[in-house]
Amino acid sequence: MNKEVKSKEKVNHKHFDKGQIFVKIMAGFLALLMVLATGATLIFALMG
């Protein structure tokens, strides 16, 4: 019975890791967009 419980936990853990990787990629992408938007705003503010 302990082996069955451990195997189920491993399957759920693998699925959780895929979701966690996706969330980290999306968070990084959004952070990059924020940095680019801030840089563009500063450039246009200094030019104008």
Image: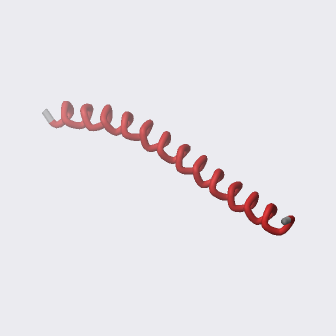
Residue that sits furthest to the left in the current view: 1
Q: Which residue is drawn at the image coordinates 75% and 57% (left, top)?
A: 40
Residue 36 horizontal side relative to residue 29, left or right? right
Query: Between 23 and 21, which is closer to the camera in this rendering?
Result: 23
Q: Residue at the far front: name it.
A: 48
Percent position of residue 9, x then y? 27, 37
Seen from this angle, which residue lies furthest bottom?
Answer: 46
Image quarter of the C terminus: bottom right
Asked if residue 42 lies left or right of residue 29, the reply is: right
Please, is residue 43 above or below residue 4 in the view? Answer: below
Identity of the residue drawn at 37% across and 39% down: 16
Q: Is residue 11 above or below residue 30?
A: above
In this rendering, the count of numbered labels is 0
Left or right, residue 7 beside residue 44: left
* Residue at x-position 76% and y-position 65%: 42
Residue visible at 71% across and 55% down in the picture: 36
Q: Position of residue 6 (x, y in %)?
A: 24, 37
Residue 32: give x, y in percent of width and height.
65, 52
The colour style of the image is secondary structure
Relative side of 10 to 22, left or right = left
Foreground residue, 14 or 2? Answer: 14
Q: Quadrant of residue 20?
A: top left
Work out which quarter of the rendered image holds the N terminus and state it. top left
Residue 11 drawn at (x, y percent): 32, 32
